[in-house]
Structures are given as structure tokens and as C-alpha cells.
Image (cartoon, grey):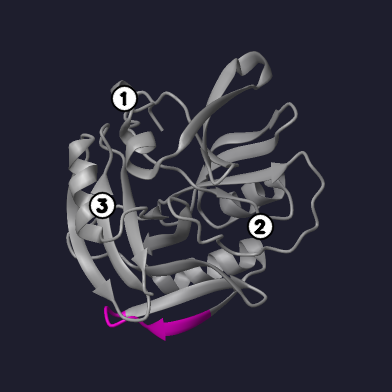
Amino acid sequence: MQKPPNPFYTGLFGWKLDTMNVGEGGPYTFFVNADKGFGGIVQTDPAHGIPPHWSSYLEAVPTVDEACEQILAVGGSVLQPGMDIPGIGRMAFAIDPQGARINSFKSAQSDDTPPSGYSGAKGGISWVELMATDPTAAVAFYCSLTGWTSYDIDMGMGPYTVMQDGDVMLAGIMALPDGVTQPAWMIYFGIVQETMEEALVELKRFGGQDGMGPMEIPTVGTIAAVADSTGAWFNLMRSSD
């Protein structure tokens, strides 16, 4: 994501910024929430058709290179083959068969700990979700790629599929909403304010813009689609009490 002018994320969520050296790539700025690093900032190039955006990384793959092979085999494309980041891990950038950007990642640190889901910390990642042109095909593709299982639920907004590893819910897949034409993975952050209305006021104060919502989702909470001060879209969530 293109680095936004401070203090958008530090102001809206209370995140901290830190840096690490990634070898030839030089220093890398990353976000810290609840004492844990979880995301970073890189410079995008709008002149070459790459607008500011959030990008998710998929760790539940056999290897990064096998993931690339599977994506190519079913009609996707690989933008950047597997590459090693010293001390961090191996990653690749790709496009899934329906055109959604998906990155795969394997940490350099050996970790066989099973997934635990989302921490629920305020300001942290609370959910990720794929909007697809063909949700059924997308579910089959990602189950094959990751080994996840799935089940369908009624969210009151049409069919919705939950992807899980064992009993741990990790992601959702749904049809593209009306007016949206580009399949994409979307990320949700839990608000730190008491209400969504307060969060949206703060969002605008720090230079962001609201898009769709707020919307009440039964048993889930309140969500809103918003953009940061550079135009990168993401979602806010206030979970049900």
C-alpha cells in the first residue's frame, strides 16, 4: 500500500509504526497493534495502473511455488514468482482465476501451530472476505489451494460461504455486490471507538472517506466500506456485543 500521510492509521486506530531492514530492499515500515506487527507499507505506482490498496497474504499453502503452479493450472496468472526475503520468508504475487489479487507467503520461521483465528483486539484485523463473480468456483479453487473446508450461511444479504481450517473460521466468500465489477479480497478492521458513527467521524477527520454503510449484519455487527487518505479501500467493523 502507498504510504499514507500520517496520522491516518495511527490516529484512527492507534497503531504504531516500526521499521525493519529487509536486505537489499532497505528499511520496511510496518504497523503494530496490541504489540504485534501485522501489516506494512510499500510504495505503489499509480502511473502504471497500481492504485493504493490493501493486499492480503495467504499462508495456508503447501509452498509458495506450488501455489503459483496451481494458480497457473486453473487460469490464473503470476505477477511475481516466489522470492525470498531474508529472515522473513518466501512470497509470490498472483491473480486468481476470477481476477482477484492474491499473494502467498511462507514464513522463514518454522511454525506448526494451528491457526487460532482473529484476536479480536480493537483496531486489529477482524475478517477477510472475497467478493467473486462466481462464488461457487471461488470456493472450490481456494479449498483446493489451501485444504480449507467451507459451509454456507444466510447473512440476510444472499448466499455467503465461510472458509475454515478445522473449526477455525478464517475468511468469507460472496458474490460481487451490485455496482462492483472487480473481484477482490477485502480486509476488515475492528474499530476502537464506541460506535461506528464515531469511527466514521474520526475517519473523515483524518482525511478518509466513507463509501457504503453503515450496515447492520445480524449476529455479526455493524460494517462500513471506507477509504483511507490515499484512496485505499478497506472495511470497518464493530462486532455485536
Q: Nearer the viewer, residue 100 or 216?
A: 216
Q: Which residues are magenta?
A: 151-158
Please determine whether, in this image, residue 158 is positioned above or below residue 117: below
Query: Within the magenta stretch, is there residue 193?
Result: no
Residue at the image point whose x is 55% and y is 58% from the top: 74
Q: Mark 3 or 2 closer to N-term?
A: 2
Q: Percent x, y for residue 206? A: 23, 35
Residue at the image point whose x is 34% and y is 64% from the top: 238
Which residue is label 1 attached to? 5
Question: Residues at badges 2 and 1 in contact (C-beta under 8 Å)?
Answer: no
Q: Percent x, y for residue 234? A: 33, 49
Q: Is residue 111 left or right of residue 129?
A: right
Q: Mark 2 or 1 closer to N-term?
A: 1
Please determine whether, in this image, residue 17 is positioned above or below residue 70: above
Q: Which picture quadrant has residue 89?
A: top right
Which residue is label 2 attached to? 60
The residues tagged by marks 2 and 1 sit, at their Cα atoms, a distance apart of: 33 Å
Q: Can you tell which mark lies on residue 222? A: none
Q: Secondary structure at mark 2?
A: loop
Task: Look at label 2 and name its amino acid.
Answer: Ala
Q: Mark 3 or 1 closer to N-term?
A: 1
Q: Percent x, y for residue 59? A: 64, 52
Residue at the image point whose x is 49% and y is 74% from the top: 162
Question: Residues at badges 3 and 1 in contact (C-beta under 8 Å)?
Answer: no
Which residue is label 3 attached to? 199
